[in-house]
Amino acid sequence: MEKLARAHVLICGGTGCSSSGSKVIIPALREKLQAKGMEGEIKIVETGCHGLCEMGPLVIVYPEGVFYIRVQPTDVDEIVETHLIKGRVVERLLYREPATLETVPDYDDIAFYKKQKRYALINCGHINPESIEEYIGADGYEGLAKALSMNPEEVIEEIKSSGLRGRGGGGFPTGLKWQFTRSASGDKKYVICNADEGDPGAFMDRSILEGDPHRVLEGMAICGYAVGADEGYIYCRAEYPLAIKRLRGAIAQAEEAGLLGEGILGSGFNFTLHIKEGAGAFVCGEETALMASIEGRRGMPRPRPPFPANSGLWGKPTNINNVETFANVPSIMRDGAGYFASQGTETSKGTKVFALTGKINNTGLAEVPMGITMREIIYDIGGGIPDGKKFKAVQIGGPSGGCLPEQLLDLAIDYESLAKAGAMMGSGGLVVMDETTCMVDVARYFLNFTQDESCGKCTPCREGTKRMLEILNRICDGNGREDDIPLLESLSRSIKAGSLCALGQTAPNPVLSTLNFFRGEYEAHIKDHKCPAGACTALIGYKINEKCRGCGLCKKVCPVDAISGEIKAMHVIDELVCIKCGACQAKCPFKAIDKG
Amino acid sequence: MAIKSLDDLRKIKERARQSTAARHENETQVIVGMGTCGIAAGARTVMTAILDEISRRGLRNVSVLQTGCIGMCQREPLVDIVRPGEPRVTYGNVKPEDVPRIINEHLVNGRILTDMVVAKI
């Protein structure tokens, strides 16, 4: 008989917490519990991502639900002695709200979690992702069982009435997509899960695959039943080794349990799943390039139509959805479409997972109802901007998206409102920027990314992004020309019009949206040779002012010996030698060095 | 483990729910005093006995918690029983051999053991 575990210690084993050191906590804790003879009464569970990656490694102790942050192996003794033996909370390891600095012991009371509505992420961080029993214990595979008791058309109707739209970026209605594949003629059909998450700063798909892999398998099986497919592929980039490992384990468990394979749950429905590891090319997130890659060909997009629903993988009707889309399906099936459809806005139903990165206190993942404002996400959930800096803009939708400036912080977010503002939902990656970020430099960063990732098939994308990047480089270097802005705009139009796939069609967006909201910054670079944010090193310089007392500290710290001067006399910076690293300014005790 | 029907699925769900029951605080609770005084008086062995007894009876939805010193150190080990909607009852000088009686009479059947009670909160 298994002994009752009075307490469960959940340790986050997601990629974020693993890289901040959670892997070494588990053996340390196990050893300590053994030494105390408590291994039978305390259960250690390695979970997936909790979303608050900034504060990792995260450890949660149940039944109390106490939330410990940045736990190190040296903290294990105190957690065992004080909390697990004596039942007292270890105060110093508790989370503090960035705004008030007050400690919050209870998981559920933390502001980061309070405003969230977890639907796709409901199990992430709460169950052991490597245990099919724990997934079943959390109502897992009941959605599939219910789907199998209905006919496929009814399943598609349910998904349609939920209002679920593609979470990978396109926002196409999922139920309608399923119907197209179902109506397509052919005996052999496929289901593909697009797990080729590539936007810089987006990691929701990885976290779902790592934290709740069975949910994605169940969603795919339901889809297979609805569209009439008996085989599926998960296309996941090889840079996600933990996700792939958990997926392989989950597929093996589901096959053994008879939840994948032949005659699922005693029905006549067969469904098998394969994993295809991708090499991480950004363009392979585009559906036709993705299928080419599965077929063993070079990952390049092709013109549509024909759409995958009619002619997809190996020319067969194929339904492709993104990880987060599939993760929403099991609960919609199990509980009916009602709850999902009751969340969100008129055109965008349900919840969306956003990845918070950049200049924000709580870096991590947050799932919120559609229609929430950016202000709530950044300030209430994200905890605001660190170091008392001022918010400048938020980039949404990755390299295909755009920037939202401060005046749009109160925009209710959904697919339509973002498109209207010149951005896009994309996969939901948010990069927050403060007053020290140069918007020309941001546009350059994204152009550099798309230019690098362009597959080269369409000339406007291949050559046009290169020319745009050259122009942005020279603007940042202080060599911008008078007509560079109209030239950028004209190139943008050509690239958008002349590219086959979304990579090229959206590549100019970061430039266009920064031009739209921050045109003055471009002009300052070009006309005044100034970078208003003080970020472009070619356009800034350091000068020593009359507050200098001649202490010599700046001279010592300068890595290139650009500073000269006698002790107790004013020092001087040689601008020709200076590399603008800012080390002198940081070191000066008298605020005698100006940047400008 | 082959799952052939919804019934099979539900059976596994029931089993899985038991193994994760400790991940929320239940309304039915056993609370052991784990201050220095409690530990010195043998609260650890009482706690182990409680866990054994709960496992042996296959009781579900019971949280076993600890608390600090309440000031009545001479009566340690102290064990509190909380049942939903009933007052919290404290037993004093609890020995491991008393545990089965407390669990059976009070926790399961709601009959307070008047000979051992020290307080009602």
Image: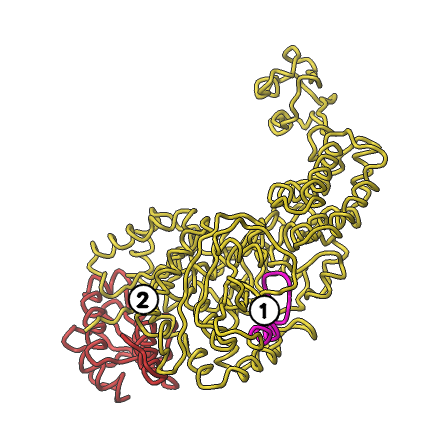
- What chain letter is assigned to the residue under label 2? A
Left or right, A261 with respect to A587, comes to: left
Q: Secondary structure at mark 1?
A: loop
Q: Looking at the image, which residue is at 25% across and 67% down?
A: B73
Vertical relation: A593 (above or below) B87: above
Left or right, A426 with respect to A324, comes to: right
State the image coordinates of residue A37 (x, y, percent, origin top left). Answer: 19, 59
Vertical relation: A368 (above or below) A355: below
Which residue type does callout 1 highlight?
Asn
Along the line of sight, which residue is nearer the eye, A524 or A160? A160
Indicate the colour of chain A: yellow
Indicate the colour of chain B: red
| Quadrant in the picture for the N terminus of chain A | bottom left
How packed mark 1 is, by other alpha carbons closer than 10 Å (few <14, some 14-19, many 20 or more), is: many
Q: Which residues are magenta?
A: A164-181
Along the line of sight, which residue is nearer the eye, A448 or A515? A448
- Residue A2, image quadrant: bottom left
- Residue indicated by mark 1: A310
How packed mark 2 is, by other alpha carbons closer than 10 Å (few <14, some 14-19, many 20 or more), is: many
